[in-house]
Image (tube, helix red, strand yellow):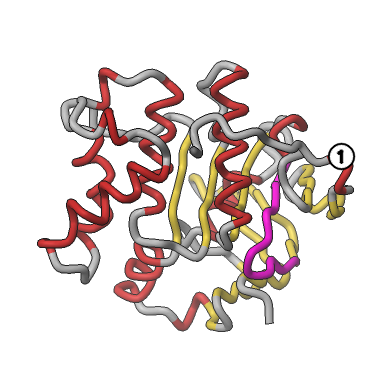
């Protein structure tokens, strides 16, 4: 069974008794270790789908299985645990605390883990070293460039060694060079065994993936593998 499996997922939002559908009968699976891009224009439903897959919201209809267990069978505590331990999130706006250091930002998920506090600094510093920011570990996040902020966010997403990393428009606030470095880094994480789910509206970033699912008006328009010679190939910029 796939790591992630959706069966006829539908989502509607209610406002003053008016139903607004966002997803219509979405079905697909994602295997452990895949790199999948979910593409679509604004309003296509890709962010709604991300929220459901990432345990941030629930579907209105249909079934969602994560690691062979139906989402409806998880308690609130189990959902929170899986979201913190098995899933890492990278957002367009970085979501860093500005008046705290890189190290403190990266340690945040550990506060909600079962890992002993005495190990937090070591684990966080290892994640920071992985993204090439050891020299910035004690700088405030407000002192970082955009690319460094996103690399800090990646280190934070990695700190609990999650199975799945969700990247929601991770290059949206970056220049093209920094954006390319971030995508190359995600590609390396995938090569190391992480399942990557990328939400994007850009073909350039989607081409780093192995498979592209295109959404339109809350439905799957296409689901295709990316031919190897069409995939972006990265060079080492900061993974030395």
- Decide if residue 42 is on the left or right side of residue 161: right
Side (left or right) of 185 relative to 162:
right
At x 18% / y 31%, what residue is drawn? 138
User: Magenta part mainly helix, strand or loop?
Assistant: strand
| Magenta span of residues | 28-39
Q: Residue 214 at x, y = what percent?
A: 79, 46
Is residue 172 at least partly visible in the picture? yes
Q: Quadrant of the N terminus?
A: bottom right
How packed mark 1 is, by other alpha carbons closer than 10 Å (few <14, some 14-19, many 20 or more), is few
Asked if residue 29 lies in the magenta stretch, the reply is yes
The quarter of the displayed image where residue 56 is located: bottom left
Question: In this rendering, would 7 be left or right of 198?
Answer: right
Image spot of residue 165 (x, y percent): 51, 54
| 233 or 77: nearer the viewer | 233
* Residue in view at x 20 percent, y 25 percent: 140
Residue labelled with disc 1:
230
State whether residue 201 is above or below residue 15: above
Q: Is residue 159 magenta?
A: no
Q: Quadrant of residue 191?
A: bottom right
Q: Quadrant of residue 177?
A: top right
How many numbered marks, from 0 up? 1
* 117 horizontally vs 79: left or right: left
């Amino acid at each position: 069974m796939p790591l992630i499996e959706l069966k006829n997922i539908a989502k509607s939002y209610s406002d003053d008794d008016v139903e607004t559908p966002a997803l219509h009968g979405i079905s697909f699976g994602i295997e452990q270790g895949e790199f999948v891009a979910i593409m679509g224009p604004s309003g296509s439903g890709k962010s709604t789908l991300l929220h459901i897959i990432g345990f941030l919201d629930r579907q209105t209809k249909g079934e969602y299985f994560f690691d062979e267990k139906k989402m409806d069978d998880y308690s609130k505590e189990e959902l929170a645990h899986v979201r913190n331990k098995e899933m890492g999130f990278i957002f367009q706006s970085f979501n860093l605390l500005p008046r705290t250091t890189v190290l403190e930002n990266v340690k945040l998920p550990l506060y909600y883990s079962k890992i002993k506090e005495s190990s937090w600094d070591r684990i966080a510093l290892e994640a920071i070293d992985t993204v090439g920011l050891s020299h910035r570990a004690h700088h405030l996040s407000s002192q970082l460039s955009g690319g460094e902020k996103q690399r800090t966010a990646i280190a934070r997403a990695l700190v609990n060694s999650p199975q799945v990393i969700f990247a929601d428009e991770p290059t949206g606030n970056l220049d093209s060079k920094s954006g390319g470095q971030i995508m190359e880094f995600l590609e390396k994480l995938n090569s190391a065994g992480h399942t990557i789910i990328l939400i994007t509206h850009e073909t350039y970033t989607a081409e780093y993936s192995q498979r592209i699912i295109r959404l339109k008006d809350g439905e799957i328009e296409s689901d295709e593998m990316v031919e190897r010679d069409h995939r972006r190939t990265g060079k080492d910029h900061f993974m030395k």
